[in-house]
Image (spheres, rainbow, N blue to C red):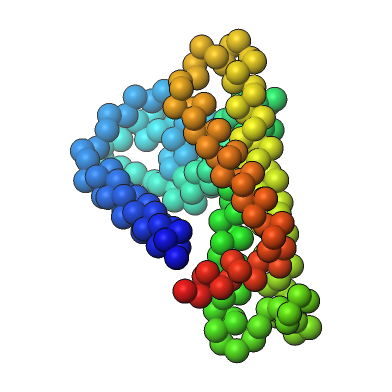
Amino acid sequence: MLLVIFIYITVLSFIIFTLVKVWKYATMPMHSRWELYPVPKEAGRGEYGGSYYEETLWWEKPRKISLVGELKEMLKEMLFIKNLFNNQRPLWWLSYALHLGIYLLGAWAILLFVGAITELAGLPITVGSTVNAHWWAVLIHYLTLCTGALGAILVAFGSGSLFCKRIFDASLQRYTSPQEYFNLLLIFSVVATGILIWTGDPLFILARERMRL
């Protein structure tokens, strides 16, 4: 019970602090434009780093902004870590394994919640130690199983390999702080213990019960 309360508090705290940070950024003064890198929202010019300053009498002309271009570049970096892929390909494989695993574990948590709601609505996901034959129960069960298992494996591999690489790679040792070692080791420990706990609840029956509390 205490663990469930702790989880709710941490999730709520994450949401609150994230919103506070977003509000702070939104209310800060506009930063200077240094023209040092491509700005995706510049319609037709973002690819090569141009801007509306190229136009003569630019202050008399409406500025053309591409929200789609800006979102596309943001998603490339957020979902695929584009710059690391382009500049540090060997490190990208390890880092992306960690990030993709985290995304999958997020989806796994959502699916657990959906499964709990489904059971509260009267459709059990499992019957005893077997999966319910209803198509929705089968879908939720196997999606939960796949995202949870693959996510845990990827996070464990990514965090463990990044921890080892930062220890044994002399070039990375210079730029790695004790906090980064701690964070990677903490992530690995949490996922490793989670995998051990999962062996006692392979169908996530107890996990969905916790979601219903």
Give the residue drawn at x 38%, y 25%.
35
Q: Quadrant of residue 86?
A: top right
Residue 86 seen in render: no
Give the residue drawn at x 54%, y 46%.
75
**Residue 114 image point, x, y percent:** 57, 73
**Which residue in the rendered view is the most extreme toward the bottom?**
122
> Quadrant of the image for the N terminus?
bottom left
**Residue 132 image point, x, y percent:** 75, 81
Q: Which of 28 and 191 is in front in this view?
A: 191
Give the residue drawn at x 59%, y 11%.
171
Q: In which quarter of the image is residue 167?
A: top right
Residue 36 seen in render: yes
Is the residue 38 above or below the residue 79 in the image? above
- Looking at the image, how many numbered discs can be counted on the residues? 0
Q: Which of 73 and 126 is in front in this view?
A: 126
Judged left or right of residue 110, residue 52 is left
Give the residue drawn at x 68%, y 43%.
154
**Residue 174 image point, x, y percent:** 51, 12
**Residue 112 image point, x, y percent:** 59, 68
